[in-house]
Image: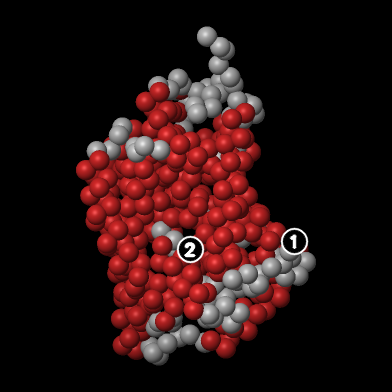
């Protein structure tokens, strides 16, 4: 499957197309992880509060929830953030080849992304990441000229400072604060109230989202934003080095797995245990600090695993399956939220708090499979995903081709 062409595109070699397909396949993988994590927050008003959902307290429910936290939470948005930073270098290089201004176009792209994210947060899912990406994209634009080593060093320093801040909070709480800041009764009442609103009509759903936004904004500012910016910078460094523009040596990929999985899973185990059993304590703050440092290792191991699979016997089939979804990642990301909102809120079936964690996981896997095949069908005949088309139009102030240009037969 070839990349769609448009009137302004620069011809791309078959080797470059293969590398771009790998990039798109990684986006497709990140979409799955983000879908799984977001579904846990939409399906239950208790998820993320530190209080166990009273409807799902069986051993099976707890096991599934712990596994999802262990393997998915805080991991895949890092991979997506890395790819955002990497793609920034591709967009800038493309603008230079065409001889068109980049800064103004990229700012328009960020403004359109912010508008989509704001609507997404209010209407569908308060945990939106697009607005954060849009704001951090301005920072990326400012520092985009830094050298490769400087960008990588800045990224590592930012992660270290974020982890130090959380460890400092844990130390302060252990020394001067109460043993636990968790108010289970109040949090349960708030979750019950949110579930009632989310089960109501569209106005009630939006009201619930607006009430949740301040807490979500604080989480994004204090946790996700610094980590996402660090991964932007790692992606910037990788893009400047052309990391994915050529095959990565198999030894490097194996080494990434051998280092990333043990370190990443060890930190993830501690994080999963802390968010379940140490909520509101100094131990949770320490666990978050460790997760900040180890989660990127697990995200890198996931990416290395996929790249190795793509080189294997069924590699082309895997890439062909994931890449179309990755090419229209924005459309798929918002479509995921729309479907989850229809299933779990008053926009549709209002099933919030009624499906077990295992049922939600199976549902997500089925929906994601449908997305993969729907994306392949769409990209076979269209140049861009629906929202990618809008974003490109806003970026370049042009009307991009809607249908895919086909090459004449030889």
Q: Can residue 243 be seen in this view?
A: yes
- Where residue 7 appears, x then y in whole percent? 56, 20
Residue neighbourhood size for the residue with mark 1, other residues' Cα within 10 Å, grouped as few (<14), some (14–19), many (≥20): some
The residue under the point 50% across, 56% down is: 34
Secondary element at tag 2: helix
Residue at x 30% of width, y 81% of height: 171
Position of 297 compared to 40: left or right?
left
Q: Nearer the viewer, mark 1 or mark 2?
A: 1
Quadrant hosting residue 162: bottom left
- Disc with the residue nearer the chain's start (1 vs 2): 2
> Mark 2 highlights which residue?
220
Bin the neighbour count of mark 2 within 10 Å (Cα to Cα): few under 14, some 14-19, many 20 and up: some
Between residue 223 and residue 322, name the one nearer to us: 322
Q: Could you tell me which secondary element the residue under label 1 belongs to?
A: loop
Q: Residue at x 31, y 88 (%)?
A: 175
In the figure, 141 relative to 342: above or below? above
Q: Which mark is residue 348?
A: 1
Q: Where is residue 407 in the image (x, y as percent from the top left)?
A: 55, 16
Colouring style: secondary structure
Question: On the image, which quarter does residue 247 sit in?
Answer: top left
């Amino acid at each position: 499957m070839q990349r769609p062409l448009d009137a302004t595109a620069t011809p791309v070699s078959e080797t470059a197309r293969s590398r771009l397909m790998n990039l798109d396949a990684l986006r497709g993988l990140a979409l799955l992880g983000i879908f799984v994590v977001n579904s846990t927050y939409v399906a239950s008003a208790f998820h993320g509060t530190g209080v166990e959902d009273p409807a799902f307290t069986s051993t099976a429910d707890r096991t599934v929830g712990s596994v999802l936290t262990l393997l998915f939470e805080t991991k895949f948005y890092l991979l997506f953030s890395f790819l955002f930073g990497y793609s920034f270098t591709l967009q800038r290089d493309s603008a230079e080849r065409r001889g068109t201004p980049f800064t103004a176009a990229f700012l328009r792209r960020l403004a359109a992304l912010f508008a989509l994210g704001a609507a997404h947060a209010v209407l569908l899912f308060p945990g939106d990441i697009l607005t954060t990406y849009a704001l951090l994209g301005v920072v990326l634009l400012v520092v985009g000229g830094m050298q490769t080593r400087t960008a990588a060093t800045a990224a590592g320093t930012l992660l270290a400072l974020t982890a130090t801040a959380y460890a400092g909070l844990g130390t302060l709480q252990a020394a001067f604060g109460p043993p636990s800041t968790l108010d289970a009764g109040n949090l349960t009442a708030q979750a019950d109230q949110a579930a009632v609103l989310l089960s109501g009509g569209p106005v009630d759903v939006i009201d619930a989202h607006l009430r949740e936004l301040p807490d979500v904004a604080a989480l994004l500012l204090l946790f996700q934003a610094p980590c996402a910016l660090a991964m932007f910078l790692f992606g910037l460094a990788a893009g400047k080095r052309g990391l994915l523009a050529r095959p990565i040596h198999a030894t490097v990929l194996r080494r990434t797995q051998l280092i990333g999985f043990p370190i990443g899973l060890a930190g993830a185990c501690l994080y999963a245990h802390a968010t379940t059993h140490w909520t509101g304590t100094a131990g949770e703050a320490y666990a978050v600090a460790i997760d900040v440092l180890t989660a990127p290792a697990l995200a890198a191991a996931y990416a290395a695993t996929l790249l190795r699979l793509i080189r294997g016997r069924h590699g082309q089939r895997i890439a062909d399956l994931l890449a179309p979804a990755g090419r229209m990642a924005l459309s798929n990301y918002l479509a995921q939220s729309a479907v989850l909102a229809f299933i779990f809120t008053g926009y549709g079936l209002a099933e919030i708090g009624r499906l077990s964690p295992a049922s939600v996981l199976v549902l997500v896997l089925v929906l994601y499979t449908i997305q993969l095949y729907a994306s392949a069908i769409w990209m076979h005949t269209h140049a861009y995903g629906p929202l990618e088309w809008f974003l490109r139009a806003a970026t370049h102030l042009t009307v991009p081709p809607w249908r895919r240009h086909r090459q004449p037969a030889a």
